[in-house]
Image (cartoon, helix red, strand yellow):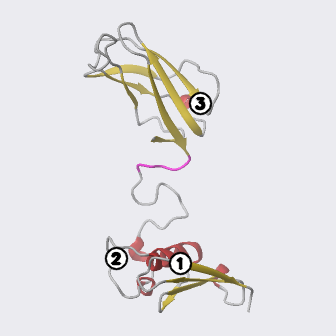
């Protein structure tokens, strides 16, 4: 499913129109009639503009009012000589194109700024196991994490006298067990 950031008018909503005679070949030179449904509402004409890309591909350049509602966005397009087409997008509150932190202000966009002991003095690689993922989660959520023999311990609001969570992994760092302890 394609994701669109809420109110983002910079990303086109693309769809393919195919010839109704063979149901395969992209149909060019059309003026599609397009309607959209936002989060299950009745279909309406979008405020944005529809244009041809080529090879049977078309796009809706959405107006802000076309992508202002979170949830599924269904596009329906019809044109004479082409099969009707339906495309489903998902309007989300985060930015799926932001590679650093999805545009979420509470996520650290620079992993290198996290304390070195979170990674148990190892290099971050493509084999992130459960232990490392838990450590990253603990650091992001609380700012405090330690790893000792496959165990991640973190405290609510950086205070060891409050409730603490201990997450353990197997020797391969794959399976996890999470235990929540009352305040000490």
Q: Main secondary structure of the magenta part?
A: loop
Location of residue 177 by image quarter: bottom right
Image check: 46 left or right of 181? left
> Which of the image's four quarters has the N terminus?
top left
Rendered view: 151 above or below 34? below
User: Is residue 84 or residue 12 the one in the foreground?
Assistant: 84
Is 33 part of what is drawn in magenta? no
Question: Is disc 2 placed on a helix, strand or loop?
Answer: loop
Q: CA distance from mark 2 to mark 1?
A: 20 Å
**In the image, what residue occupies the spot 32% across and 70% down?**
126
**Residue under the point 60% across and 40% down:** 70
Secondary structure at numbered mark 3: strand
Mark earlier in primary sequence (3, 2): 3
Q: Quickly name the residue at label 3.
A: 38
Residue 30 seen from this side? yes
**Label 1 neighbourhood size at 10 Å, few (<14), some (14-19), many (20+)?**
some
66 sits to left or right of 78? right
Depth check: 125 or 45 in front? Answer: 125
Determine the CA span between mark 3 and mark 2.
41 Å
* Residue 94 lies in the magenta-colored region: yes
Give x and y (percent) for residue 54: 26, 22
- The kind of secondary structure element at disc 1 is strand
Rendered image: mark on residue 124: 2
Residue at numbered disc 1: 176
* Residue 52 x %, y %: 32, 20
Bounds of the magenta segment: 93-97
């Amino acid at each position: 499913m394609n994701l669109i950031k809420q109110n983002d008018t910079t990303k086109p909503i693309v769809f393919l129109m195919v010839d109704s005679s063979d149901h395969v070949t992209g149909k060019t030179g059309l003026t599609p009639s397009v309607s959209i449904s936002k989060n299950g509402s009745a279909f309406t004409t979008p405020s944005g503009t529809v244009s041809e890309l080529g090879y049977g591909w078309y796009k809706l350049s959405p107006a802000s009012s076309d992508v202002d509602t979170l949830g599924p966005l269904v596009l329906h397009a019809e044109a004479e000589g082409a099969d009707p087409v339906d495309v489903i997008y998902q309007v989300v509150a985060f930015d799926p194109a932001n590679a650093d932190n999805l545009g979420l202000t509470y996520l650290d966009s620079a992993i290198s700024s996290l304390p070195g002991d979170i990674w148990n003095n190892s290099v971050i690689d493509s084999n992130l196991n459960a232990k490392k993922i838990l450590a990253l989660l603990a650091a992001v959520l609380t700012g405090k994490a330690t790893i000792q023999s496959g165990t991640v311990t973190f405290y609510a609001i950086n205070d060891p006298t409050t409730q603490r969570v201990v997450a353990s992994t197997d020797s391969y760092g794959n399976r996890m067990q999470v235990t929540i302890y009352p305040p000490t």
